[in-house]
Amino acid sequence: MTVKKCTTIPERLCVTASLFSVICCFLICQQAGAQPQDSLSGFYRVSVDTLPVYTEPSEDAPVSLHLLKGMEIEPVDNTQSEGFQWFEIKINGGSFWLKHRDLLTNKTYVDTKYERKEEEFFNLSNSDKKILVNKESRILILYEKYGNTWKEKKSYHVGLGSFSGKRLSTSLTFQPRVCLVLMRDNGFKLYEKPLSKFPDAQKARAVVFVDRDTKKITVYETVSGKWVKRDNQYRLGDKIIFSSALVWFYDDRFNLIYNDDLFPKRVKGDRRTPEGIYYIADINHVSQFGRDPDTGAGLPSFLISYPNHMDAWRGLTGGIISVTEYNQITEAIENSNIPPQNTPLGSLIMIHGGGEADWTAGCVSLNDRDMKELVSEVELHTPVFIK
């Protein structure tokens, strides 16, 4: 005789609860495998030197494309695979997958921490000389290393590409005291006699007084509708920087550059000077621009490593260059070679002589005597930061 065991109500509830728990656990695990816990949105910057990408979220699908430090990327999708969190980025209609985090160690491959350009510039290479070009003030500064610190050794006036700001000049003036009023509409007025009163602060933004007897320049600016004197003391010939303009008194006239359109170089033929961290990639020992002021021979010029990896990244994501051209540029930069000079991004960006006006096709130009002096100071692979 077989005896059937009866299951009590509490036991039935226990079994049902257990089955419900297993089902819930299974569903949660399935969802966790499909979607990572932290969603990715917005822009991210690569904070490592080089980072490979893949055609799929798998280490078995590499592609010859590297992201470099400082590049800004925008993920469009994300997933988990092979122990990593990945996200997808779109480049010219193609999909590429990038490691974001190691799920076991929680190591992050891409984040928002990156070095400032100035810090990266001064930490770059083992050179004891560096060049900084400030486009806004049209100044080239040569730095030299002393122990663990960098000190300014010499500065030079420079010119840029012909589309780098709007250059204007006043008429000649020979009065002992003159002043220039910068208007808010980017115009100016020259006064050859003392002002009886300050101009309307709603229409003017700065006043520059020149005293030829003392060889001093005094500057006033509007702050919250009131005129305030600058503490800085300027001499004749000094370049005075304003928020969107550059002014200096030289050769009996005021010279002005309005920097409202001071944009970096992007494509061939735009006649703009690039911005970024570069190095002297080559030296042309006899340039067509500039003559030795003592011998009359052609001066050397320095080829800048344009385009750099950031120029290439912008060109790639903007559809200007191909993946192949991008790879050629970044490979040359990583090996401190001359980057390709035949892409739509432009080429032959030099530091050369020939004068400090904004007359070039995108190069940085110095007067010939300054260029001769600079040539004696720097060498191949000297870092150059243009900002």
Image: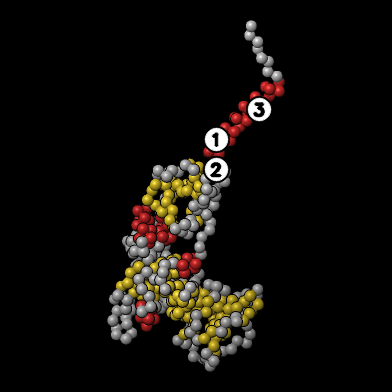
Q: Residues within 10 Å of mark 3 (few under 14, many from 20)?
A: few
Per the rendering, the mark at residue 240 is: none
- The residue pinned by badge 1 equals 30
User: Depth check: 375 or 232 in front?
Assistant: 375
Q: Quadrant of the N terminus?
A: top right
Residue at image x 48%, y 41%? Answer: 81
Sooner in the amino-acid sequence: mark 1 or mark 2: 1
Sooner in the amino-acid sequence: mark 3 or mark 1: 3
Residue at image x 57%, y 46%? Answer: 38
Q: Pointer 1 and pointer 2: residues touching (CB < 8 Å)?
A: no
- The residue pinned by badge 2 equals 36
- The residue pinned by badge 3 equals 17
Going by the numbered disc 2, the residue's amino acid type is: Pro
Q: Residues within 10 Å of mark 1 (few under 14, many from 20)?
A: few
Image location (x, y in percent) of residue 276 = 44, 66
- Which secondary structure, mark 1? helix
Q: Is residue 346 above or below residue 288?
A: above
User: Label 2, label 3: how many angstroms apart (C-alpha)?
Assistant: 28 Å
Q: Please tell me in which quadrant of the rendered image residue 9 appears.
A: top right
- Is any part of residue 143 visible from this angle? no
Image location (x, y in percent) of residue 244 = 53, 72
- Which secondary structure, mark 2? loop
Report the mark closest to the observer, 2 or 3.
Answer: 3
How many tags in the picture?
Answer: 3
Q: Is residue 360 above or below residue 93?
A: below
Residue at image x 46%, y 76%? Answer: 146
Residue at image x 38%, y 48%? Answer: 63
